[in-house]
């Protein structure tokens, strides 16, 4: 058994705080605007069953791998992987995977802050009754007016980044733990309020049928979608779960804790669908997915049902809290690393990194308006261009960063982490951290970490690249 180590950053008070932290990291915008719609489109209950299988085979083994690496190393992901690789007699260059994951998390935070800022704007709009009786044209114009205004986007992007930095800068116990103890119960409470309201709309069963009708024929087209979402929804591949694992008590069961996080993440996503789609149907609208559901369809629905404005305010507060709990997990790995590397205070390191993310995020702000014509990775008749203004092909700044992180860096990070746990740390180190009572269960889990999960990530990686 390895000598117990202690993180210089602090520790969670209990395994339940880790569950809150990891669930907060996992529950984000995708749970609200993507998963419920995917469930309805790809076979309802059949898709949920397929998704849970993918979670068990791919998502949870990677989360297990990240958590046990973090707890065994008790440092930032970069330094934990470097130290553990040296202990195992392997190359210290394995730490490059964590370094790339850390950079990916900062890049994701840069645009996530902008998108999350939209919810802050809509909180104000709902609060002053701006969506009462709104039409489809009016909702589209309202969203377009927001994204077309760089100053307005900058305001909300700045505010959201400051909110994220304040939590991280206060430390693991005073900042992260104390905030999560408030944020996560608030998130669950708001979701229950929305679910209770949806029961009064008269369309709850229509929403239930949309989500849980059992259609095995449709699920075939959603297998890759289920596998991809099982990977992305748990916030693995960037080191967030690894650094949270570094603060986890030694006597806490990693297996049971990670399973609880996976179930809570799925429960939140399904509850969000049950809460939202009856409201959409009550307003006579068609269900959709993506930002269009959240910022166009739902404002129309909330603006045209009884007590909709109040429920819309509750909803966008819920969205903001979910985004906030996710954003702090993206910043923490880099803050932990640079505190260890430089010896500077958390407040100083957090301020610098938050400013850096804010600056990169301005590229996303401008990509919706004055910089929309700036295109990257353009393949034209005259060859390849890294950057070209006004090109027909290519991606804008926001789409480029999103593509780089979600389709390349995250799958590669998840693959590296699970391979490191299964093949570098080795069987005895994994057994020591997981402390499973039943040898056969450990053998199964270790096999999932070593073989099945890496193959699943490779499939996700290839599928994402070919989209």
Image: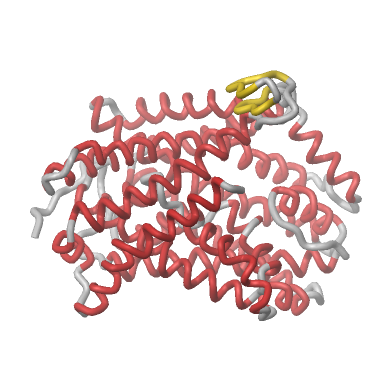
The image shows residue 86 at horizontal and vertical percentages of: 13, 42
Q: Is residue 73 visible?
A: yes
Left or right of residue 173: residue 52: right
Instruction: Say which residue appears at 74% left-offset and 55% top-offset.
Output: 312
Left or right of residue 103: residue 87: left
Instruction: Say which residue appears at 21% left-offset and 45% top-offset.
Output: 7
Residue 141, compared with residue 389, is above or below; it is below
Instruction: Say which residue appears at 23% left-offset and 43% top-offset.
Output: 80
Q: Is residue 154 visible?
A: no
Instruction: Say which residue appears at 50% left-offset and 40% top-offset.
Output: 405
| Quarter placement of the N terminus | bottom left
To which quarter of the image does residue 217 belong?
Answer: bottom right
Could you say which is closer to the camera, residue 466 or residue 26? 466
The image shows residue 316 at horizontal and vertical percentages of: 67, 51
Could you say which is closer to the camera, residue 130 or residue 288? 288
The image shows residue 445 at horizontal and vertical percentages of: 29, 70
Left or right of residue 220: residue 92: left
To which quarter of the image does residue 8 belong?
Answer: top left
Residue 352, compared with residue 126, is above or below; it is above
The coloring applied to the image is secondary structure
Could you say which is closer to the camera, residue 219 or residue 292? 219
């Amino acid at each position: 058994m390895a000598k117990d180590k202690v993180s210089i950053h602090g520790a969670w008070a209990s395994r339940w705080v880790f569950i809150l932290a990891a669930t907060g990291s996992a529950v984000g915008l995708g749970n609200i605007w993507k998963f419920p719609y995917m469930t309805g489109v790809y076979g309802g209950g059949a898709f949920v069953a397929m998704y849970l299988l993918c979670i068990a085979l791919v998502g949870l083994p990677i989360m297990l791998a990240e958590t046990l690496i973090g707890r065994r190393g008790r440092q930032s992901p970069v330094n934990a992987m470097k130290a553990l690789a040296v202990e195992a007699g392997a190359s210290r260059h394995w730490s490059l995977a964590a370094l790339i994951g850390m950079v990916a998390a900062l890049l994701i935070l840069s645009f996530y802050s902008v998108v999350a800022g939209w919810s802050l704007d809509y909180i104000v709009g709902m609060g002053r009754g701006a969506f009462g009786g709104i039409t489809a044209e009016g909702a589209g114009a309202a969203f377009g007016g927001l994204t077309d205004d760089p100053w307005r986007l900058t305001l909300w992007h700045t505010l959201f980044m400051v909110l994220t930095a304040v939590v991280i800068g206060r430390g693991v116990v005073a900042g992260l733990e104390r905030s999560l103890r408030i944020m996560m119960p608030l998130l669950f409470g708001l979701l229950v309020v929305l679910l209770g309201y949806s029961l009064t709309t008269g369309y709850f069963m229509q929403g239930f049928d949309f989500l849980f009708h059992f259609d095995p024929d449709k699920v075939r087209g959603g297998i890759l979608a289920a596998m991809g979402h099982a990977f992305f929804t748990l916030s693995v591949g960037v080191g967030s779960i690894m650094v949270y694992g570094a603060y986890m008590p030694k006597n806490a069961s990693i297996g049971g804790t990670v399973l609880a996080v996976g179930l809570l993440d799925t429960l939140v996503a399904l509850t969000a669908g049950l809460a939202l789609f009856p409201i959409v149907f009550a307003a006579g609208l068609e269900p959709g997915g993506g930002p269009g559901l959240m910022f166009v369809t739902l404002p129309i629905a909330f603006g045209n049902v009884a007590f909709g404005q109040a429920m819309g305010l509750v909803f966008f507060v819920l969205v903001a809290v979910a985004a906030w709990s996710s954003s702090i997990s993206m910043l923490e790995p880099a803050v932990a690393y640079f505190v260890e590397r430089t010896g500077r205070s958390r407040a100083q390191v957090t301020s610098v990194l938050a400013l850096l993310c804010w600056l990169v995020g301005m590229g996303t702000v401008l990509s919706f308006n004055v910089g929309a014509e700036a295109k990257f990775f353009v393949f034209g008749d005259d060859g390849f261009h890294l950057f070209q203004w006004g090109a027909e092909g290519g991606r804008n700044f926001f789409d480029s960063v999103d593509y780089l992180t979600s389709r390349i860096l995250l799958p590669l990070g998840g693959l590296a982490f699970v391979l490191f746990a299964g093949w570098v740390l080795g069987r005895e180190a994994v057994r020591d951290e997981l402390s499973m009572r039943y040898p056969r269960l450990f053998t199964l889990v270790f096999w999932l970490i070593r073989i099945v999960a890496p193959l699943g990530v490779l499939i996700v990686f290839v599928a994402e690249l070919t989209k």
